[in-house]
Amino acid sequence: MVKKKNEMYEWIKALIGALAIAVIIRSFFFTPIVVDGASMNPTLQDQDRMIVTKIGEPKRFDIVVFHAPEGKDYIKRVIGLPGDRIEYKNDVLYINGKAYNEPYLEKYKKSLKDGGTLTDTFTLKETAVGSDTVPKDSLFVMGDNRRQSKDSRAIGAIPLKKVIGTTNVVYYPIKDIKIVND
């Protein structure tokens, strides 16, 4: 009888320990997320399941998950860092006056049947950000599906404190498992 109680106690301790470790990992290091919508097409698909890494600061062109103003979590690509001047002209991204290639958009640009641009011309001041530069401690983010993305152009700069983390690992559906590269 004593042996059974000791064995049961050991199992309970092991389960509580495993649960505590899982909570710590999910709270401070990694968490799953489900892509909701088409704003990151063709890079990510609706209902893709991804792992969000909560370690480190986001870098330019990272895919980030953040708490949006509507109380939802959004997934978008970092285009501008604090202090950057952002401009689009003729479907070309300019950051601080320098043209940047966006290889993750090439496939989508080639698929445009109307011959138009993927990203309309704008300056940062003309967006919801309303200033010449990305504000301190904030990011300018955009969805890869530029024609159908509610992003910093409409909701403004994203405070770094609202960023949950970065993501680039799709783990479900199994046939689409991949690491998303820039």
Image (cartoon, rainbow, N blue to C red):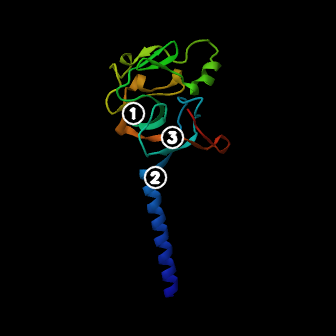
Q: Residue placed farthest to the bottom in the image?
A: 1
At mark 1, the secondary structure is loop
Q: CA distance from mark 1 to mark 2?
A: 24 Å
Where is mark 3, residue-wise? 167
Secondary element type, mark 3 = strand
- Single out the residue that lies furthest toward the right: 175
Q: Position of residue 151 (x, y in %)?
A: 44, 27
Write the residue at 51% across / 40% down: 167
Task: State whether residue 102 is above or below residue 68.
Answer: above
Q: At 61% across and 44% down in the image, what residue appears?
A: 172
Which of the marked residues, 1 or 2, is nearer the chain's N terminus?
Answer: 2
Q: Is residue 72 visible?
A: no
Q: Which mark is residue 45?
A: none
At 58% across and 31% down in the image, what residue appears?
43
Q: What is the distance, in whole Å, between disc 3 and disc 1 at their CAs?
A: 21 Å
Residues packed near mark 3 inside 10 Å, few (<14), some (14 to 19) or many (20 plus): many
SS at badge 2: helix
Which image quadrant: the C terminus? top right
Residue with the mark numbered 1: 70
